Image: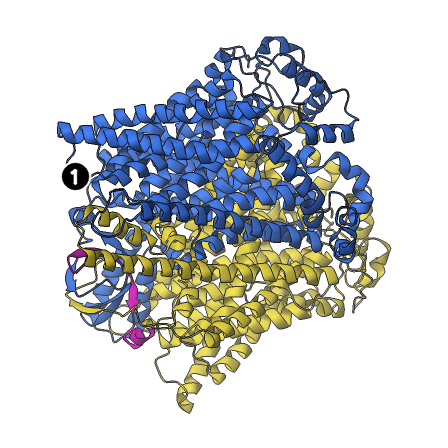
Chain colours: A blue, B yellow
Amino acid sequence: MALLLPLLVRAAGGLRAAGQGGGGSSSSSSSSSSSAMEELATEKEAEESHRQDSVSLLTFILLLTLTILTIWLFKHRRVRFLHETGLAMIYGLIVGVILRYGTPSTSGHDKPFSCSQEDRPFTTLLVNVSGKFFEYTLKGEISPGKIHNVEQNDMLRKVTFDPEVFFNILLPPIIFHAGYSLKKRHFFRNLGSILAYAFLGTAVSCFIIGNLMYGVVKLMKLVGQLSDKFYYTDCLLFGAIISATDPVTVLAIFNELHADVDLYALLFGESVLNDAVAIVLSSSIVAYQPTGENTHAFDAAAFFKSVGVFLGIFSGSFMMGAVTGVVTALVTKFTKLHCFPLLETALFFLMSWSTFLLAEACGFTGVVAVLFCGITQAHYTYNNLSVESRSRTKQLFEVLHFLAENFIFSYMGLALFTFQKHIFSPVFIIGAFIAIFLGRAAHVYPLSFLLNLGRRHKISWNFQHMMMFSGLRGAMAFALAIRDTATYSHQMMFSTTLLIVFFTVWIVGGGTTPMLSWLNIRVGVDPDQDPPPTNDSFQVLQGDGLDSERKNRTKQESAWLFRLWYSFDHNYLKPILTHSGPPLTTTLPSWCGLIARCLTSPQVYDNQEQLREEDSDFILNDGDLTVTYGDTTITANGSSGPHTATTSLDGRRTKSSSEEALERDLGAAEQEVTSRGTRLVFPLEDNA
Amino acid sequence: MALLLPLLVRAAGGLRAAGQGGGGSSSSSSSSSSSAMEELATEKEAEESHRQDSVSLLTFILLLTLTILTIWLFKHRRVRFLHETGLAMIYGLIVGVILRYGTPSTSGHDKPFSCSQEDRPFTTLLVNVSGKFFEYTLKGEISPGKIHNVEQNDMLRKVTFDPEVFFNILLPPIIFHAGYSLKKRHFFRNLGSILAYAFLGTAVSCFIIGNLMYGVVKLMKLVGQLSDKFYYTDCLLFGAIISATDPVTVLAIFNELHADVDLYALLFGESVLNDAVAIVLSSSIVAYQPTGENTHAFDAAAFFKSVGVFLGIFSGSFMMGAVTGVVTALVTKFTKLHCFPLLETALFFLMSWSTFLLAEACGFTGVVAVLFCGITQAHYTYNNLSVESRSRTKQLFEVLHFLAENFIFSYMGLALFTFQKHIFSPVFIIGAFIAIFLGRAAHVYPLSFLLNLGRRHKISWNFQHMMMFSGLRGAMAFALAIRDTATYSHQMMFSTTLLIVFFTVWIVGGGTTPMLSWLNIRVGVDPDQDPPPTNDSFQVLQGDGLDSERKNRTKQESAWLFRLWYSFDHNYLKPILTHSGPPLTTTLPSWCGLIARCLTSPQVYDNQEQLREEDSDFILNDGDLTVTYGDTTITANGSSGPHTATTSLDGRRTKSSSEEALERDLGAAEQEVTSRGTRLVFPLEDNA
C-alpha cells in the first residue's frame, strides 16, 4: 500500500497531513504561544503547498479539456493535417513557455539541508526540530551537479514529475487498450510477419541506429562537440529507445478512413509488439554490465547474459499476462457472473490491473504483461462477458486510454520547456534523424523482401513505403527516454528523442492522408465486416452462406503458423476457456471423457450451430464496431455524419464484391469505387 | 503535478527511480568497484522495496477480487443477511489478522536517523552520504511517543496508508456517484425535509452526541479510566464524525427490493447531504481555536468564527460544484460534442474531477463540491449528453464507486488489526453506542414531528422508525476519524468509530430486510416509473395522458420550496443549460429578446411538444434504469432472474393504480399486492 496510497494522498493532499498533524498536536501539547504560532506558520505553509499542488494538477486538466474541445472542433470541421496528439503537444508547449518565462522564480523557502551521514542512505529519516520530530522519506539520489537545481522555480518543479509515472500509471491503460482492441482476425492472419517485424525488425533497427549513433558520437568527439562520456552501450540504448514506433496518429487516421485492413494489422501489430520488445531490449541493455575493469567494451559473457535477460523477461511477462487472462476467462466462464455486469466489469478491471502488479512483483515487465493480458482477455474472456460488460469494459479502457495518451502528449510538449537539463547538440540531432531513417529502411524493406518469399499474399511496394513512412515515435520512446536522465549522455538522448517525437508526430501525422492518396492505398474498407480474403488471387468467394467451406479454405491457405495455432485454439483453448467452439467431448481423445464433459460448457451443445458462424476468427465484434463508428464522422468520400448501423450492414452485404476487387488488382484502387472501397480523393472538400 | 505524480510513481514504482538513478550514475562516475558494489546493493534494496509495494497492493486487489466473487455467490444464492460491504470488512479482518500475527517482523534496515536542526522543518532535505547526495521529502510530524513505532513490521506499515487517500482518491468518486445517481424527482419533492434532516438533524445529533460523550469522559476521569487529556472540542468533533450516517447497505437493499421511493429519497438525500455537513462541521470544529490562554473552553468569538467558517466553506464548496456543473452543461449544450461520445465522456470526467481540485485550490472542501457538481451534472448536463455518453458516464462512475467503496470497507477490516495505536476503552465505547442511539433518536423523531406539521404528505411512524434504524455509519465516519489520529483522544475516537462502523454495518445491514417486513414498508415499487403522487390523499390521478394537468397539480400541491425552485428551474435554468424546457423567448421578459434567442437551443422549438412529456421532473432516466435493473435479480416476491424491459413497461402501465393505492392508505401496504407494490413476505424462500 505504501506504494500507491500514502503518495497518492500527498498527491491531492499535499502536505496537509503534516499540517493537520501539527494542528492535532497543538491541542494536546502544552500551549506555549510561540510554538503555536510556529505551528500555525507550518500549517499555513503546508496548506499553501497543497494549494499549489492542486493548481498544477488543474493546469493539466485544463490543458486536456482545451485539447478535447479543439479536437472536437477539428473533427467537426474535418481538419486532418493535425492529429489530437499533435494538438495536445502544441498546447503543452504553450503552457510550458508560459510556466518557464511567465512565472516568477519563487524558490527559497525549500532550503535544502545538508548533514553528513555514514555509509548508505536510509529510507526513512527522523529529524529533530526544536524538540519536535519530523519524518522524511527518501526521494532519490541527486547527482552532485544538480544540487543547485533543487532550489528552483516551484511551479516548474511541480509540473515536472517522476518518469516512473509513465511506466506505472499512464502506459498500462494505453497498452492494455491496444491489446484489448486488437483486430484479432487480421492480427492472427498476419501473425508471422508481425512477429518478424516486431522482434527481428526492432533488433535490427536498434543495432543499426546504435552503431550509426556511435559513429556520430565518435565524430563529435573528433570535432570537440562532446563534453562528457558517451559509451557504446549508451548508443545502443538510444537505438532501443528510438526503435519503439508508435503510429498512434497513423492508426487513428487509418481507422477514420477505413484504410486497408492488412496494412492496418501489420502496422498496429508491429507497433504494439515492438513497444514490448523495446522496453525489454532497453532493460537488457541496461543490464549489460561487463564485469571487471573493461566497462563499456564488448564482453561476450555479459552480452549473452543480456540476451538471456531479454528472453527471460519477455517470456516471463508474456506468461504472466496470458495466465491472468486465462484465469479471468475461467472465472467468468464457470461462474454466472454475467448476470451482474457491474461485478463482472469490476472483476475484469481488477484482474487486468493485478497482471501489472504481479509481473512487477515477480521482477518482470508489467507493461508487457498487460499487453498480453489484453490480447488474451479480448480473445477468450470477452466471449464470456455479458453484452453489457463487453461494452462497459471496452468503453472504460477506451476512456482511460484516451486520457492517458493525451496526458502524455501534452506533458511532452510541456517537457520541452520545463525540463531543466536539456542538451541540444545539432550534430547528434541531425545524426539521429538520419539514423532513424536508415534504421527504419533497413528494418522494413529487407524484412518485407524475406517475408514475401514465404507469403502468398505479398506485401506490396506501396504497403512497404507506407510502413516506412509510418515509423513515427511517440509515448513509448518518450517514456523510455525520460526514465533515466541522470547523465550527460542520457540527457542528450532525451532532448533528441523529444525533438524526434515532435517532428515525426507533426510531419508524419499530418502527411498520412496525402501519403495514402499518393500511394494509392484503398480506403473506405470496413475492417470488421471484411471476410478473410482468399490468398490466391484467382479464387473468388461466392455468397455468405458457405461458412464451413470458408473456414476450411482459411485453414488451408493461411500461413502454417496461423493454421497450427488456429486449430489448437479452436479445438482446445476456446472450448475450455469460453462458451464457444466445438464440444471438448468431440475434440479430445475419448479417454479424457470425464474432464472433457466437466470443462465443456453446456451452452456449447445448444449453441454449436449458431456459434459455428461466429467463431472467434470470424467474430464481428459488434461492441467494437459501435465504438469505432462512434468515433468516426468522416469517410474518404467526404460524406458527413457518423456511420450508421445500416452502413455497416451494407458493408456486410457488399463485402465479397469488394474483396474480389482487391484480389483482382490490388494496386488499381480506382476501380473499386463500385463498392465501399472508395479511392481517396485528396484534398477533401468540406461540404459541411 | 508534484502532488499526484511523483508520488504515484513511487506508488507503483517504489524506490526504483532512486535505484535507476544510481545505475545511471554508475556509467558516468569513475569505476571504483567498491562504490559500484554499494550502488548495486542500494539498487537491489530499492527493487526489493518496489516488489514489496507491488505485493501489498496485490493483497488489496486479491481481497477485492475475493469479495466480488463472494458477492456474486451471495447474490446468486440470494443471501441477504450480509451485505457486500460487510463481507469486504470480514475479508479485510481476516487478512489483517494474518498480516498482524502471520508475518515476521522485518524491521531494522529502515533505521531512523536523527539530527538536530534549528527553527522549523524544511520540506526538502538533502543528505550527504559518503559524497553522494540524496533528497528526502517531509512526510509529517511524529509525536514523541510514536518515534519507536517508526521501526515496525514493514508489511504492516505498507498496508497502513495515509488517511488523506480517503479524502482525495476514494471518497470523490463515491460522493460524485451519489450525487449523479440521485433520483431527482423524489429528491426535489422532499427537498425541504431532506435539508432539514441533513442540516438541523446533523447539527442536533453532533451537539447531543458531543455533550453526552463529554459526560462519559467526565465519568471516565472520575473513575480514573482516562490516561490523557480529552477536551470538550474533541467530544464535539467525535459528535461530528459519528453523525455522518452512510446507509449504503440499507440503500442497496432498498434498491434491490424496490422499497418505497419517498423513504428512499429521504434516507438517501439525508445521508448524502449529511456527509457534506459532517465534513464541514468537523473542519469548523477543528478551526475552533479560542484565542489567548483559555484553550478548549467556550469562547463566543471563536464559536461564531467557526460558524462563519462552516457557512463559508459550505456555500463556497456548493457554489464551486454548481458552477463547474453549469459550465459543463453549457459546453455540452453549445458544442456538438455529442457526436463524439468518447470526447464527451472524457470532458465530463475531467470537468468533474477539476471541481474537486478547484475547490481544494480555493481552500474549500473538494468532496462537498464534487457532490453538488454531481447533482448539477445529473440535472442539467445529463440531458445534453448523447445516449452513449449517458450510459458511459453512469457506468464509469458506477465502477469507480463500487471499487472505491469496497476498497474502503476492506481497508476498515484491515485497520482493526494493522493500525498500531488502538485505544479501546469499554466505558467510552458503551457510552458512544448509547450516545449515537440517543443522538439519532433526537434527530429523527422531533424533526419528523416538526416537518409533519408542514408536510401534507406526512412522514409516517414506520418511516420514522426505519430512518431511526437506518442510521448506520460507514466510509465517511471512518475517513473523518482516521484523518487525525495523532493524540490520545483521537486514537480512542478512531477505535470507537471503527467498532461502531462494524457493528452498525453488520447488524443494521443484516437486519434491514426483516425490519422492512416488520414495519410493513411496501417493497417492489419501481422508483423510476412512479409518477409524482398527489399530495392530497383524496385526489386520484386518472390515466397517463394528462401531462399538463399532472404538471400543474405537481406545481400546486408540492412544498412551496419545491414549487419556487421548480418554476425557476423549469423556466430559466433548464432552457439556458439544456436543450429542453420552454423557449426562453417565451419565459424571459421581452426586452431580453436577443439574449433569449441566443441562449435558446434551436432544438427547443422542434422538441417543445415532445419534451413537455419528459420534463426533468418526470424524466424517466432510462440509462439509470438499465443500471438498476442490471444490478437486480431479486424481487420481493422471490421471482428469479433480472427484471426485463417488459417488466418495467408493465410497471409504467400499472403505476397509477399502485400510486392510488399508496394515496388511499399509506399504512396498509398489505392491500397493494394487486399491482407491483407487493408486500415483502419474510423469510424469503429460495426457489432457485
Disc 1 marks which amino acid?
A: Asp
Q: Is residue B116 toward the left or the right of residue B51 in the image?
A: left
Q: Is residue A183 above or below residue A27?
A: above
Q: Is residue A318 toward the left or the right of residue B548 in the image?
A: left
Question: Is residue B662 highlighted in magenta?
Answer: no
Q: Is residue A284 toward the left or the right of residue B382 in the image?
A: left
Examine the rendering and report whether any part of residue B647 can be seen: no
Examine the rendering and report whether any part of residue A283 can be seen: yes
Q: Residue at x 24, y 60 (%)?
A: A42
Q: Residue at x 35, y 27 (%)?
A: A436
Foreground of the two, A382 or B356: A382
- Image x and y of residue A134, in percent: 26, 66
- Image x and y of residue A558, in percent: 64, 29
Q: Is residue B649 toward the left or the right of residue B21 in the image?
A: right
Foreground of the two, A518 or B437: A518
- Image x and y of residue A116, in percent: 14, 63
Q: Is residue B105 above or below residue A357?
A: below
- Image x and y of residue B167, in percent: 44, 57
| Quarter residue A298 falls in | top left
On-image quarter of the C terminus of chain B? bottom right
Q: Chain of mark 1?
A: A
Foreground of the two, A280 or A101: A280
User: Range of the magenta residues?
Assistant: B127-149
Alpha-carbon neighbours of circle 1 within 10 Å: few (<14), some, or many (≥20)? few
Residue hosting label 1: A228
| Quarter residue B142 falls in | bottom left
Q: Residue at x 20, y 56 (%)?
A: B33
